Image (cartoon, rainbow, N blue to C red):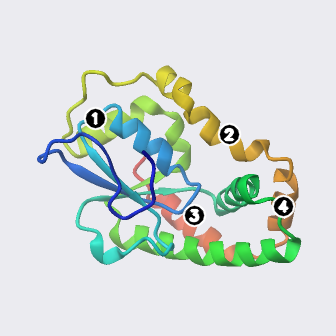
Amino acid sequence: MVGYTPYYVSGGVHLNTPRLLIASVPRSGSHGLEYILATNLEVKIVRNHPGLSTFNEKNVKIPAISIIRNPTDCISSWICMNEKSTGEQAEDDLKVFISNYSKAYEIGMDFAKRKATVIMKYESLSNHDLIVDFFKNKFNLQKISNSLSQEQYWQNGIKHEVESSKTHYRYDYVRSLLEKTDLNKINSLYLELFNRSEL
């Protein structure tokens, strides 16, 4: 089951199981981190995106994890994934989309600065064992008996999720459009949090 509501939970089912919130901007690896944690540790995962209408910061009562990813990569990935389902967008529409995403990204980074218990780099998602050990120790979590190895993790479809936007035929065009766009403000936020990240 996959969803974007503030209360979507995956992982263990016991009432006393620890809970963690993954609060990151779209296309920054939330699904991948959720899958790693929920299939390896006794933890319930709540997932949502600061900056989108489904997110209400007042509902955040549990430790929050923010994954930070280069904004150009996030934006190009989200545009391409959307176009796979909605069709090709005109350049003017893409510029509006980029502006709206930039605002959402800024809100997401502001939330990470103020509220995140853990800030982690998108690139860390490729190190499955490091993630499991880090969160196990950070939150005193227990490993589950049927946990997945990194090879099993990739075989279960996450590799497709990560790579899918780069296979879109307009990926290079979208990237070239972004190179002409002023993203200095959100790039600065990204670099600030990159330097503060624990993982």
Q: Is residue 24 shown left or right of residue 144? A: right
Which comes before the other along the chain, label 1 or label 4? 1
Give the residue displayed 88% in from the left and 57% down from the top: 173
Closer to the chain start, of discs 3 and 2, is: 2
Q: With 138 as the anchor, is 91 left or right in this view?
A: right
Quick one: label 3, few (<14), some, or many (20+) residues within 10 Å? some
- Neighbor class of circle 4 (other Cα within 10 Å; few <14, some 14-19, many 20+) is some
Few, some or many C-alpha atoms within 10 Å of disc 1 (few <14, some 14-19, many ≥20)? many
Q: Confirm or deny contact between disc 1 and disc 4 (CB under 8 A).
A: no
What label sits on residue 88 in the rendered view? Answer: 4
Q: Horizontally, is 112 left or right of 190 in the view?
A: left
Instruction: Identify the element where label 4 is drawn.
Output: loop
- Which amino acid, mark 2? Glu
- Please tell me whether mark 3 sits on a helix, a strand or a loop: helix
Which one is earlier in the sequence, the residue at label 4 or at label 3?
4
Q: Can you say which quadrant of the picture contains the N terminus?
A: top left
Asked if the residue at tag 2 contacts the one at tag 3, i.e. Cβ–Cβ closer than 8 Å, the answer is: no
Q: Which comes sooner in the sequence, label 3 or label 1?
A: 1
Image quadrant in which you'd find residue 92: bottom right
User: Which disc, if any, is residue 41?
Assistant: 1
Name the amino acid type tagged 1.
Leu
Residue placed at 42% from the left, 39% from the top?
Answer: 35
